[in-house]
Amino acid sequence: MDAYVGGIEAGGTKFVCAVGSGPDDVRAEARFPTTTPAETIGRALAFFREQEARYGPVGAIGIAAFGPLDPHPNSPYFGTITSTPKPGWANADVVGPFRSALGVPVGFDTDVNIAGLGEWRWGAAQGLENFIYLTIGTGVGGGGMINGKLLHGLVHPEFGHIALPHDWAADPYKGFCPYHGDCLEGMAAGPAIGQRWGRPAFELPPEHPAWELEAHYLALALRTFICTLSPERIILGGGVMEQPQLFPLVRRKTQAYLNGYVQSPVILEDIDSYIVPPALGNRAGVLGAFAQAQMLLD
Ligand code: ADP
Ligand code: ZN
């Protein structure tokens, strides 16, 4: 049986905490808004103490966090959020308080790597050694596995900040990324759609031209990721992908922009099983955090 552990999805807008051992055994779950580090981490600790009284101690805790962050266990800054503009969170130590208060191993990685790990363990990436998980929400982030290992590097990948071709005549919107303006995140995250069209993304009807343009940018990005990483599958999550009409548009445009160059049957003939939504839905992060905690115990 899988070990009883804790998981935290530490997002920029909300925290989700849970205890259990897998998708069919989530014994308790709590959600609350992300405010200051002290208050938010305090609420999370209170949740785990409460569950400890009920179910006994967890073996380990996994944390899927918003970034940028330091995911390297040997770094002096491991477990911290690094350069975020989010007030109070720059250089905040997330792992330390859990380690010292609960005395268990604590894992820490990007929300997207951990959501990918959840999909690998129980969802849409089972059995694969190479896949990417992208979220298109308040920002655009990406993670996943290459050769069976979660994606790390100098720091961690920043899929959202790649440069894209920008036809200024067709789309005069300048992008909202404070660092790059019209990078992928600047052009295609939820806030970009809202600013470009003057209405929140979730209010735009399915036939609105916003979705064709959104699919265009996402497909340009997927072409780049397919050509650089050669993933065996691409999982697209996040609030923006709740628009079901986006999937067929993104699939068709990705095929068109690759233009037959990548000779793989799954891209040429079975793209519906290549570009997919997360099987665990919006629970991928917290379940991935369970999987990460369980790996610390193995
Ligand atoms: P976060 O990225 O903060 O974790 P989400 O993944 O829910 O959260 O992304 C929030 C963004 O997604 C917002 O910009 C919002 O406008 C957009 N969004 C949320 N739901 C929808 C929807 N059903 N359709 C289109 N866009 C949505
Ligand atoms: Zn950027």
Image (spheres, grey):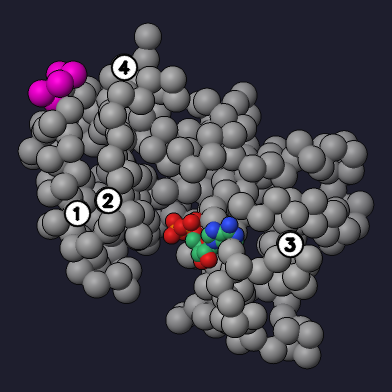
Relative side of 170 to 232, left or right? right
User: Distance between the Cα atoms at labels 1 and 2?
Assistant: 8 Å
Q: Which residue is mark 2?
A: 32
Return the disc, 3 or 2, that comes first in the chain's sequence. Answer: 2
In this view, the residue in front, 274 or 17, is 17
User: Distance between the Cα atoms at labels 3 and 4?
Assistant: 43 Å
User: Distance between the Cα atoms at labels 3 and 2?
Assistant: 31 Å
Residue at image position (22%, 22%) is 59
Relative side of 133 to 10, left or right? right
Question: What's the magenta region?
Answer: 52-56
User: Distance between the Cα atoms at labels 1 and 4?
Assistant: 26 Å
Find residue 206 and name its label: 3
Q: Amino acid at mark 4?
A: Ala
Q: Which residue is mark 4?
A: 3
User: Distance between the Cα atoms at labels 4 and 2?
Assistant: 25 Å
Q: Amino acid at mark 3?
A: Pro
Label 2 crowd bin: few (<14), some (14–19), many (20+), radius 10 Å = few
Position of the N terminus, as image quadrant, is top left
